[in-house]
Image (spheres, helix red, strand yellow):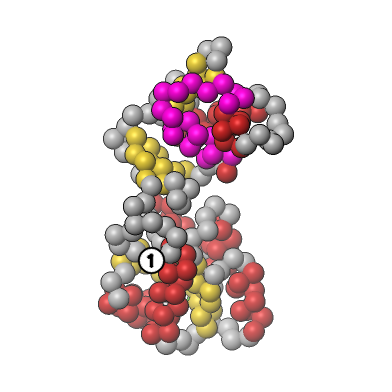
Amino acid sequence: MDKINILVVEDEKNILEVIKTYLVKEGYSVITAEDGKNALNLFESEDIHLIILDLMLPKISGEEVCNIIRAKSDIPIIMLTAKVEEDDKVHGLSIGADDYVTKPFSPRELVGRVKALIRRSYRDSSPLAEILIFNNGDLEIDLNKRLVKKRGKKVYLTTKEFDILVSLLRNPGKVFTREQLIESAFGYDYDGFDRTIDTHIKNIRQKIEDNPKNPSYIITVYGLGYKFGGV
Ligand code: CA
């Protein structure tokens, strides 16, 4: 990771500025949002590594933002809450935040929490990230983060879809029968019919192909199975 991008979501401008100043001083790159809707848009369009999220936000609450993001990503999230009750602490963590900080807080403490959470969340990712890029950046796959981008925009594959795609692209050009693909992606004990692969393939194509009916990544080899056609 060259630069760590932090999304700070806070509707109180002065608090937002203080947080930003402290994080930038520590060498982080900071993107800001003042409401929940904008936060979700930025999460989709930018490459974010950690989110600092205020609980009470206009348009979409911090809690809801957290829920929506958690449904698709395990990105580290620190919740900011103005309430001091112990209940909120428990609640903040139960909706999927990794840590929480109660207002008023010391910016130094927040920076400390950020550093600790970054260390915890990314310590296993090797400096040589396994990112595969196909067709001049049209399709980008981060094998460590299990992240797929189509034309720079994140697309969300299910675990099975991702595993199928990775099995194919690890052997570009190799034709997999449905049985081989199941074995390669899910292992022997997978308890499904060969044809369920077709449904997964159809879904993956919807997400990564320009034209799912005339695919360039997952090619049907008639009578045999599938192969990966990306270069
Ligand atoms: Ca607020």
Q: Residue at x 31, y 69 (%)?
A: 28
Q: Quadrant of the N terminus?
A: bottom left
**Residue 31 in view:** no
Q: Residue furthest right?
A: 191
Q: Residue at x 66, y 80 (%)?
A: 87
Residue 147 location (% of width, % of height): 45, 47
Q: Tag 1's secondary structure?
A: strand
Is the distance from the Cβ of mark 1 to the nearest ligand 1 atom less than 8 Å? no
Q: Using the image, determine if residue 187 lies above or below residue 106.
A: above
Question: What amino acid type should be assigned to the residue bearing mark 1?
Answer: Ile
Residue 9 location (% of width, % of height): 43, 69
- 111 left or right of 72? left
Q: Using the image, determine if residue 49 lies above or below residue 164.
A: below
Q: Nearer the viewer, residue 153 or 129?
A: 129
Q: Residue at x 40, y 74 (%)?
A: 115
- 28 left or right of 90? left
| Magenta stretch holds residue 171 | yes
Disc 1 marks which residue?
A: 6
Find the magenta span and give its range: 160-180
**Residue 140 in view:** yes
Q: Using the image, determine if residue 11 lies above or below residue 103.
A: above
Q: Using the image, determine if residue 19 lies above or below residue 208.
A: below
Residue 16 location (% of width, % of height): 38, 76
Q: Residue at x 58, y 26 (%)?
A: 180
- 135 left or right of 40? left
Q: Nearer the viewer, residue 230 or 183?
A: 183
